[in-house]
Amino acid sequence: MAGIYIHIPFCKRKCHYCNFYSIASLKNYKEFMEGIIEEIFLRKNYLEGKEINTIYFGGGTPSYLEISDLKKILEEIQKYYLFNPNAEITLEANPDDLNPNILSEYKKAGINRLSIGVQSFHEDDLQYLNRIHSAIRAEASIHEALDAGFDNLSIDLIYGIPSLSSEKWEKNLEQAFSNGIPHISAYSLTVEPKTALDVLIHKKRLAAPVEERGIENFHILLRKMKEHGYEHYEISNFCKPGHYSRHNCQYWNGEHYLGLGPSAHSYNGHSRQWNVRSILEYAGQIHHGGRFFEIEELSPEQHYNEFIMVHLRTIWGCDLNKLREKFGNELAESFSVLAKKHLSNGKLAENGGIYTLTDEGKLFADGIASDLFSDT
């Protein structure tokens, strides 16, 4: 079982907070397509014949991709990889790119899951984030997607925006609930170094996020999701029963995946690879038979620490028996000893040897995980 991630680096314009590799232009689109079609062939043995159960078009803005090129990518994958006909195929989309005609084309192409980048249903929040769509278009895109038969639908929301009061945040959530959306990803706004948001805050042209507001929004998020029957199955992800993102669950369960496109990452169980963050370098190296990626062989310690990091973020937690089976008694015992502090302060819970974050602990997930890491 494995997944394929396809990075589409094109955007109509860059959001202030974005630190992913993307360009606000269709320049070098032809070179990108030539490169990715060739990479699909070149990397056909990377997953060692594992069945492809998920495909995920991320970005950037995958809905900026020509429908004919979307189909071509999927056709090439099915040509060279063991493809599960019931695979989950997700496309990230911006609300302004969606309409009934394109949604119908996505269905015909085999897309069976949409992830719409709503971020907020309030205009001032969207302007702060430099989103290209309006609040009205955000709502309309959801109705169009549901009408087109995309019942496996997810939306992204962002909290912790300076203009987002607790009352407005509750309204965002209620608007999502009223549409019956089965999956919601909610992210705290973070100011990444060298992003436009970082620069604008330092120039005093935009207000900085206030940590206390983000924490307040997070508590509201947890309460409202529980009230409306959503499972909090990963730090930033909530769904109605049975509507997990199968693709992302493969990441969190340590399954293998192949990343295609500039800046995309891959994992095959013993090493990680990441492609160069430049369309022209990526396509040029592929065309000339050069090296277009870097490789890192993972040490036993890195495998252990990654297991802790990703599993602790999920509802399924860290299973002490699995730790013992995979990494031995010494590391399992070390984990249980280090976990005592967080059990006693109420940030971790333990049930039958499975350790999970409490609601309070979810605010400190990365710090707790690093406390539990092996430093040998």
Image (cartoon, rainbow, N blue to C red):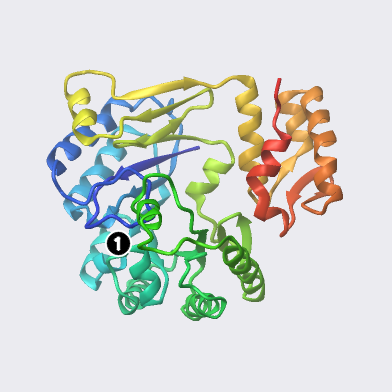
Foreground of the two, 360 or 251 = 360
Residue at horizontal 38 percent and vertical 47 percent from the top = 19
Question: Where in the figure is residue 89, as x and y percent of width and height?
Answer: 38, 52
- Depth check, front residue: 37 or 77: 37
The answer, for residue 351, to whether it is visible in the render is no
The answer to whether one can see residue 297 in this image is yes
Q: Position of residue 27 (x, y in %)?
A: 13, 45
Q: Amino acid at mark 1?
A: Lys
Q: Nearer the viewer, residue 185 or 108?
A: 185
Callout 1: helix, strand or loop?
Answer: helix
Residue 322 found in image quarter: top right
Expressed as whole percent of the image width and height from the top left, the position of residue 348 reads: 78, 50
Q: Splitting the image into 4 quarters, where does residue 114 fall?
A: bottom left
Residue at the (52%, 41%) spot, across then down:
251
Which residue does the numbered mark 1 point to in the structure image? 107
Residue 154's place in the image compared with 264, above or below, is below
Res 254 → quadrant: top right
Position above or below: 39 against 360:
above
Q: Is residue 102 left or right of residue 341?
A: left
Which residue sits at x=60%, y=54%? 235
Other residues around mark 1 within 10 Å, as few (<14) / some (14–19) / many (≥20):
some
225 shown above or below 263: below
Horizontally, is 370 left or right of 69 in the view?
Answer: right
Q: Quadrant of the C terminus?
A: top right
Q: Position of residue 326 (x, y in %)?
A: 70, 27
